[in-house]
Amino acid sequence: MNISVNGEEKTVSPDLNIHDLLTVLEMDPTQAGIAVAVDREVIPKTEWQTIEIRENSEVEIIRAVQGG
Amino acid sequence: MQEFKIADQTYTSRLLIGTSGYPNFHIMTESIAASGAEIATVSMRRVKFTDTSGENLFALLRERGMTILPNTAGCFTAKDAILTANLAREALDTSLIKLEVIGDEETLFPDVEQLLSAAETLVKDDFTVLPYCNDDPITCKKLEDIGCAAVMPLGAPIGSGMGIRNPYNIQIIRDLVQVPLIVDAGVGTASDAAIAMELGCDGVLLNTAVAKAHRPVLMAEAMKKAVEAGRAAFLAGRIPRKLYATASSPQVGMIE
């Protein structure tokens, strides 16, 4: 299925939860300091293994960067 | 010295420092250390999958025991600022948020209407809201009434280095609000930070003045001293301004 991750179109296998998606993206899902929103809704870490991503979802993965 | 407290946390340093725009990561960490700041601001941005620098700002600040203050910089609507605040809380495990809702790209002045609306939502949602706002006493009072944990009026536009452009408003805000008053933005050099503190501000938040100084680490040290000196001067109480001289040496016993 097609989804968007941080504004980039990606094709991923269906029935993927957020934990799986992060793994596919070669990110460590247990790392501190990141957060995920799907279709502008923040998904708590406790739900990363249960919430499945749907076709055309817009996923945002964010972290802290230098800022003023 | 009275304590500097935000929400329930007490801080020794009254200087809050930004982490952006330093020549490199090393100078940033050295500057933060030299400033003595205990609170550092960060922004929330998309993870770059191509980033191989291995620099992890969150881990670094946490290792150093800093309080991390995420901002909503770059947000032009209450809706975007609220989403950013929620992402920050989830990512960084803090309810602190430096709330910025910008109204105009060129001046980076706040959009007061959107700011008040976002502040109201975030306070209701148990955030500790520190809003970047205009040096307008009425807006500051409204933000306090909403339940913000501090008010952070600008001294001058972000990154302008123009200093405290309206000290009289800052003074009125000081009289009007009970929550911590922190000048955020506009500080260009140490004397600007000292002036803010002499006016009775509880703290100063700055970034560019240090990050873009010719020698950032030295400027960070200067800012630390300026904030301390300004605070001491405020507590000591300045003498009134007078147009004419008053001799400080004795007038009696002069050689005739």
Image (cartoon, coloured by chain):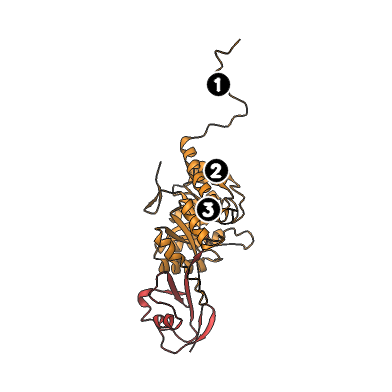
Residue B82's disc number: none
Disc 2 vs disc 1: Cβ atoms closer than 8 Å? no
Q: Pointer 1: what residue? A: B249
Task: Identify the mark nearer the N-term, 2 or 3.
Answer: 2
Residue A33 x, y percent position in the rendering: 42, 69
Residue B9 on image: x %, y %: 37, 53
Q: Is residue A57 left or right of residue B76?
A: left
Badge 3 is on which residue? B217
Q: Amino acid at mark 1?
A: Ser
Tell me the amino acid under the disc marked 3.
Val
* Secondary structure of residue under mark 3: helix
* Picture residue at 55% right of the left edge, 43% below the top: B195
Q: Quadrant where the N terminus of chain B lies?
A: top left
The CA span between labels 2 and 3 is: 21 Å
Tell me the shade of chain B: orange
Q: Which residue is mark 2?
A: B195
What's the residue type where badge 2 is placed?
Ile
Quarter placement of the C terminus of chain B? top right
Foreground disc of the pair 3, 1: 3
Residue B229 appears in the picture as rendered = yes
Residue B224: x and y, percent?
49, 47
Quote the CA–CA distance across marks 2 and 1.
Answer: 28 Å
Q: Quadrant of residue B123?
A: bottom left
Residue B180 rendering spot, x and y as whole percentages: 45, 49
The tag earlier along the polypeptide, 3 or 1, is 3
Chain ID, red in image: A
- Residue at x 44% of width, y 80% of height: A26
